[in-house]
Image (spheres, grey):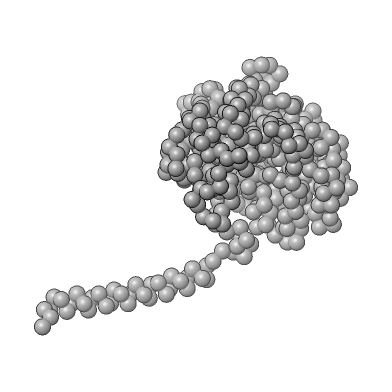
Amino acid sequence: MLSQNLKGLIKNFGKSTSSVINQRKMSNSVNKHYDFNRKYSPVGDKNVWVEFTALARDFKAVNLGQGFPDYDSVKYLNEKTLECAKESSNLLHQYTRSPGHLRLANAIANCYGKLTGRDINPLNEVLVTVGAYGSLFNSLTSFISEGDEVIIIEPFYDCYAPISVIAGAKCVFVPLKPKTDREMTTSADWSWDTKELEAAFSPKTKLIVINTPNNPLGKVYTREELQQIADLCIKHNTLCVSDEVYEHITYDRAHIRMATLPGMWERTITVGSAGKAFSSTGAKLGWTIGPKELIRLCQSVHNNSIYCCPTFIQEVIARCFELELSRLDTDECYFKSIAAELKPKRDRLAKLLIDAGLKPVIPEGGYFMLADISKIAPNFHSDENECKDSKFVKYLIKEKDENTLEKAAEILKNLHVD
């Protein structure tokens, strides 16, 4: 015969089980009802940066995938931050104007006015955003309507396509391909097929997204290549979103700004980044530059989503800009010295990869270097449906605890197959 206590436990267990089942039913109903907005469903909830950043953290691996430096930011960034922190002005701790803190908007306009050779109005031709990502989101969602087409040059930064899809566009991809099969190539050896580029434009094309210097290839577009795109944009009345966040990190070729080509200021949105300009990705501050007619539309999205960026950070970056502006044409300018600092690191990495039996693509700009892994052993014990490059990276993260470039090169040699 069961004791009263045991009977009570069984009775309560039955109630709790019933409650859990009912909660599950309700939860399933809620989940089904509140699934992804139909615009987001093609994109899903997977993000390569979230996945691989977490893996690098969990396995204490060196994260070479994200575009952030592991060395100190430019020295004066801390100095300017302290300056602002010590000031008694309460206004730095309050909202600022939505399109951008006026001191920063002025600094950006003055700096890019010199770089582009034109007067830029800080009040209506500059928009300060939450990183370059925010600038790209504002730009793409401002102009794309359901059924439009967006041309994207491959390889490309991962957010271009999903943002375009969310806005209702069909993405049309034009690949850059190597023109040579030499053991060592540079990003300059990669180009698009002219006929393929021309064929990508149609009456439905709303805009083209370009990235120079390119992430992740490192290609710096030539004037002739940019002119090809410009001619097609003008011919088809197409806008150009020009992601130029790596503008100051060029090694072998000068950066040319799309907006400086004849007829292109009127149809170009230029995207910039404090994270790349000052090696401070944590500032999460970017900007959009363009004609007032286009900036007005980008600002509408910004106003009704973010509204404004942190005033304090904008003040710090404004002072950094002002310092660089005062020495823009000197060797002291960080916009010039950063590439000089990174070039020896690029060359060292290239040598290590070559010694390991890989074929690197030497970048003309940016932080990244691609390498051909086709001769690497194929079994990396990962999801069979996963791409080989993804398997390879996960293998190095999970299976090997080496964290120096020399040791990584030795690992690659051991994986090499003829």
Residue at (47, 73) in percent of width and height: 29
The quarter of the rendered structure image containing the C terminus is top right
Q: In which quarter of the image is residue 274?
A: top right
User: Is residue 49 something that shows in the picture?
Assistant: no
Q: Is residue 251 above or below residue 62?
A: above
* Place of residue 18 in the rendered image (x, y in percent of width and height, measured from the top left): 32, 77
Q: In this view, does 26 lie above or below 261?
A: below
Answer with left or right where residue 6 lies relative to residue 367. Answer: left
Residue at (84, 44) in percent of width and height: 194
User: Looking at the image, which is closer to me, 22 or 341?
Assistant: 341
* Place of residue 393 in the rendered image (x, y in percent of width and height, measured from the top left): 53, 43
Q: In this view, does 31 lie above or below 379?
A: below
Q: Which residue lies furthest to the bottom in this view?
A: 1
User: Is residue 398 something that shows in the picture?
Assistant: yes
Answer with left or right where residue 116 lies relative to residue 308. Answer: right
* Place of residue 407 in the rendered image (x, y in percent of width and height, measured from the top left): 48, 30
User: Looking at the image, which is closer to me, 62 or 261?
Assistant: 62
The quarter of the rendered structure image containing the N terminus is bottom left
Residue at (69, 26) in percent of width and height: 251
Answer with left or right where residue 138 lies relative to residue 118. Answer: left
Answer with left or right where residue 249 lies relative to residue 172. Answer: left
Q: Residue furthest top?
A: 331
Residue at (49, 68) in percent of width and height: 31
User: Looking at the image, which is closer to me, 94 or 24?
Assistant: 24
